[in-house]
Image (tube, rainbow, N blue to C red):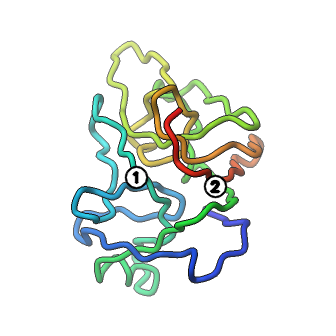
Amino acid sequence: MLNILTPLTKVHRATRRIDADNFVAAPGLWAYINSSGVLTNIARTSTSQAQPAVLKIVLGNASTNQYESNDVEVGSISTVESIFRAAVDTNGYAKFASDGTSTMAYAQGADLSVGYRIHTDATGTSAVGFVLAADIGKLRPALTGEVVVGRVENLDSTNNVLTFETVSPRVK
């Protein structure tokens, strides 16, 4: 679930080209713009890849519904290109750290980044810099040296809804 709380016009929504055969689209996920200018999913298998610098939130959806998936089928997807407030459920933020059991802390006002590396430690060590493979492309607490894309407004831990506002991207 992605709920954009800021009123937007068509000027704020952009359509980006994608690789239609390989793009996973769900509202609230983040993708990056590659060197060819195409919006691309973050790799779900890397333990050491560098964080992509230009990150965009995905508005569109790829599902079995013909209407919802039409943009993806023709090689494009909608993103938001401005500062906005939004709320996401666990489809848009990482609830658990890399061990799959430790809950991540989302303090009010904390910087948010996008998960881009998985942790393969066999002991199940929890590390906030890593996420579960299912959480690649979702918001998580930002660490020093990472691209900050948002700020926590509120976390409703009962309903698992993270309310945030995007910021001009910067390195923490």
**Residue 115, position in %: x, y?**
45, 40
Residue drawn at point x = 36 percent, y = 32 percent: 118
Question: Which mark is nearer the camera, 2 or 1?
Answer: 1
Q: Which amino acid does label 2 sit on?
A: Val
Element marked by disc 2:
strand
Is 22 on the left-hand or right-hand side of 133?
Answer: left
From the image, tell me which residue sits under label 2: 88
Element marked by disc 1:
loop
Judged from this view, the residue extending furthest toward the top is: 123
**Residue 9, position in %: x, y?**
64, 81
Of the numbered discs 2 and 1, the one sitting upstream in the chain is 1
From the image, tell me which residue sits under label 1: 54
Quarter of the image with the N terminus in it = bottom right
Is 19 on the left-hand or right-hand side of 154?
Answer: left
CA neighbours of label 1 inside 10 A, class few (<14), some (14 to 19), many (20+)? few
- Quarter-wise, where is residue 7 in the image? bottom right
Q: Which of 31 and 104 is in front in this view?
A: 31
Q: Distance between the residues labelled 2 and 1?
A: 20 Å
Residue drawn at point x = 55 percent, y = 38 percent: 140
Residue drawn at point x = 67 percent, y = 66 percent: 4
CA neighbours of label 2 inside 10 A, class few (<14), some (14 to 19), many (20+)? many
